[in-house]
């Protein structure tokens, strides 16, 4: 409620610049969505500068992003350009059970399909997907393996942040 009142008070004077520090941190999901929708609406007329640890909010609202780490700017740029620069070149594959995952891994070894494992997901390099995508699909079909997930691993601000500060 305080964030909403503070924002309403700040917007009364139609400022050229609106500075928000962690504006969605204490809001419930509905309040957060309403606040972000409002920021999206006003950013056409008002420069919005805000800091947040909720990187999905930053990604949704921002045209430009600065990543700070230990008091220093580590990266600055246009959101879409940063996503292109840090684009992932792989696909995610996930099965319903660890047994199915293990079974696919054994089959993939025999079919010369490369992958790395990250928790319960397999990461298949993009060049492998284009060159051997038919093998992956054929292997799953022949062995009646139905994935829960098979999608391109999209870049996100969180992934970019983790890459920049490591």
Image (cartoon, grey):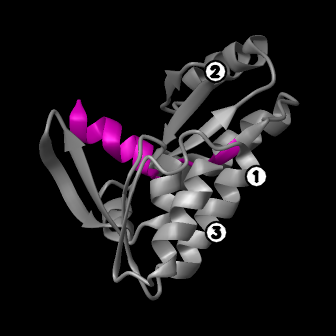
Q: Is residue 69 magenta?
A: no
Q: What stretch is highlighted in magenta?
A: 150-166
**CB-based contact (under 8 Å), mark 3 and mark 2:** no
Q: Which of marks 1 and 3 is nearer the N terminus?
A: 1
Judge from the rendering whether residue 36 lies leftward or rightward of residue 114; answer left or right.
right
- Is label 2 or label 1 in front? 1
Judge from the rendering whether residue 80 lies leftward or rightward of residue 100; answer left or right.
left
Residue where numbered disc 1 is placed: 30
Q: Earlier in the sequence, mark 2 or mark 1?
A: 1
Q: Residue at x 34, y 46 (%)?
A: 160
Residue where numbered disc 3 is placed: 37
Disc number for residue 159: none
Q: In which quarter of the image is the C terminus?
A: top left
How many C-alpha atoms fall within 10 Å of the one at disc 1: few (<14), some, or many (≥20)? few
- Is label 3 or label 2 in front? 3
Q: Is residue 154 visible?
A: no
When asked about the image quadrant of residue 80, the answer is bottom left
In the rendered image, residue 133, in percent from the top left (x then y), is placed at: 61, 49
């Amino acid at each position: 409620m305080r964030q909403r009142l503070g924002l309403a008070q700040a917007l009364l004077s139609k400022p050229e610049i609106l500075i928000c520090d962690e504006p969605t941190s204490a809001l419930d999901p509905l309040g957060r969505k309403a606040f972000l929708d409002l920021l999206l609406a006003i950013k056409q007329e008002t420069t919005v500068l805000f800091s947040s640890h909720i990187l999905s909010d930053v990604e949704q609202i921002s045209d430009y992003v600065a990543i700070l780490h230990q008091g220093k700017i580590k990266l600055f740029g246009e959101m879409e350009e940063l996503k292109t620069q840090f684009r992932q070149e792989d696909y995610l594959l996930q099965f319903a059970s660890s047994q199915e995952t293990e079974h696919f891994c054994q089959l993939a070894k025999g079919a010369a399909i490369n992958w790395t494992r990250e928790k319960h997901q397999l990461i298949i390099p993009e060049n492998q997907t284009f060159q051997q995508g038919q093998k992956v699909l054929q292997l799953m079909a022949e062995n009646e393996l139905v994935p829960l997930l098979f999608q391109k691993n999209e870049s996100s601000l969180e992934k970019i942040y983790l890459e920049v500060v490591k």
